[in-house]
Amino acid sequence: MTVREYHNLTIRRHTKGGIPTLPFVEVKEAILGKTYELSLSFPNLQTARELHVTWKNKEAPVDVLAFPLDDTEGEIILTLAMARQQASNYGHTYLQHVIFLFIHACLHLKGFDHGDTMEKQEQKYLKKFYCDPS
């Protein structure tokens, strides 16, 4: 397991490989604030499948889940293998899709539900933090 600790952000990868180099801290602070305590976990496919069954009663592995623990603390589960599989469906590179899913989850923790308002917020943050694939 790979772990990185930042001020108010802990990232854990439970699969092989390193943690993607993306602006997780900057996105988290822009959307949730500097004092928000966030845990970001990258599970393996089996754990992602189990979480999806437990929380959404769906059999396939989950791409991303957001769990608000209270107004100042939450957890995001983001499955890198699913991000890799889905990226081309959205016209994204792998890293672009990872940051999109992270932004999406942070907005859920901020209180947004799916719909036009959330999509406008996603576009705002994607424009600011979208990764250049080069």
Image: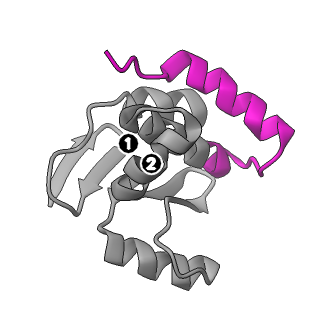
Q: Nearer the viewer, residue 101 or 10?
A: 101
Q: Quadrant of the C terminus?
A: top left
130 left or right, relative to 110: left
Are the residues tagged 1 and 2 within 8 Å (C-beta)?
Answer: yes
Residue 69: percent from left, percent from top:
56, 64
Question: How far is the residue under mark 1 from the one under mark 2?
Answer: 5 Å
Residue 29: percent from left, percent from top:
49, 30
Q: Earlier in the sequence, mark 1 or mark 2?
A: 1
Q: Nearer the viewer, residue 86 or 62?
A: 86
Q: Is residue 87 magenta?
A: no
Mark 2 highlights which residue?
Answer: 37
Q: Is residue 116 magenta?
A: yes
Q: Is residue 34 visible?
A: no
Magenta region, residue range:
107-134
State which quadrant residue 110 falls in: top right
Dot 2 crowding, Cα within 10 Å, few <14, some 14–19, many 20+ = some
121 left or right, relative to 16: right
Residue 4: percent from left, percent from top:
21, 45
Residue at image point 24% right, 56% down: 13
For badge 1, the amino acid type reads: Asn
Q: Quadrant of the N terminus?
A: bottom left
For badge 2, the amino acid type reads: Glu
Q: Which mark is residue 51?
A: none
Residue at image point 23% right, 44% down: 19
Dot 1 crowding, Cα within 10 Å, few <14, some 14–19, many 20+ = some
SS at badge 1 = loop
Question: What colour scheme does the image use?
Answer: one colour
Q: Which mark is residue 8?
A: 1
Residue 51: percent from left, percent from top:
47, 77
